[in-house]
Image (cartoon, rainbow, N blue to C red):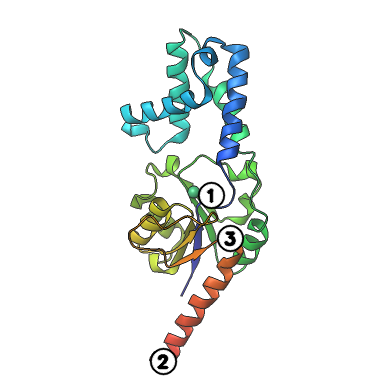
Amino acid sequence: MIKALTFDLDDTLWDVWPVVERAEALLHDWLAVRYPRIPERFTPLELRELASEVSAARPDLAHDRTGLRKAALMLAAHRADYQEFDVEGAFAVFFIARNAVEPFAEVRPTLERLGQRYPLASLSNGNADLRLIGLDDLFVFSLNAIDVGAAKPELPMFAEACRRLNVRPEQIVHVGDDPEHDVFGAARAGFRTVWVNRTGRDWPGGPQADAEIVALDELEGVLAEWEGASRNRDRITT
Ligand SMILES: [Mg+2]
């Protein structure tokens, strides 16, 4: 039987990339006023790529997107010859804008209905803040890679979710858009998996998800089918 549901956030409950790009543009404008040599030297994309450079040099920060963004900003300030730099102020500009996401229309009504039947939790590799986004009331808890100290597809976030939900992995359904982080990672942890494929992508290979949906409101049908199948199995075996 299904006892709980876990959800990825970015690109599962909202489109994240347009919002990240806008946040990067706003940060660039903020830097142009306060630290003009940084945007003169780095485009928004180059600032993002600096985070990848930091990630390669600092494996201890690889799961921490907030830490990576801050370290990349510090590196940019250093390379632009600023001795002093307000990294917290700069990151705050990015962070507020990054959380101005618009959940897909079906998200809140679907999660409200599902939340009456199952505890819901969120498992994210990113630094979305559900309080700022206004969906925190729907989840019993939210885990992210920064707090757990490891990102999906590694096991710790899934294991921590099992522990907090106090159910066995096979009783949890994980729902997410990323074939590796969400489907492979959750399946390896023993969860059932639902792949959210809004844009008609081809499956990249490897073991497939237990179900595939285009939008979140298809989830109730999938769960009803699974619950029905397990009830029939119980009838046959008892
Ligand atoms: Mg995602």
Residue 44's place in the image compared with 158, above or below, is above
Q: Quadrant of residue 159?
A: bottom left
Badges 1 and 3: C-beta atoms under 8 Å apart? no
Q: Position of residue 47 (x, y in %)?
A: 48, 24
Residue at image mark 1: 9
Q: CA distance from mark 1 to mark 3?
A: 13 Å
- Kindly tell me whether mark 1's CB lies below 8 Å from ligand 1: yes
Which amino acid type corresponds to the residue marked 2 in the rendered image?
Ile
Asked whether, in this view, residue 81 is left or right of residue 96, the answer is left
Badge 1 or badge 3: first in the primary sequence: 1
Mark 3 sits on what residue? 215
* Residue designated by label 2: 236
Q: CA distance from mark 1 to mark 2?
A: 38 Å
The answer to whether marks 3 and 2 mark residues whose Cβ atoms lie closer than 8 Å is: no
- Counting residues from the start of the chain, the first of labels 1 and 2 encountered is 1
- Write the residue at 60% across / 26% down: 25
x and y percentages locating residue 58 in the rendered image? 33, 29
Secondary structure under the numbered disc 3 in the rendered image: loop
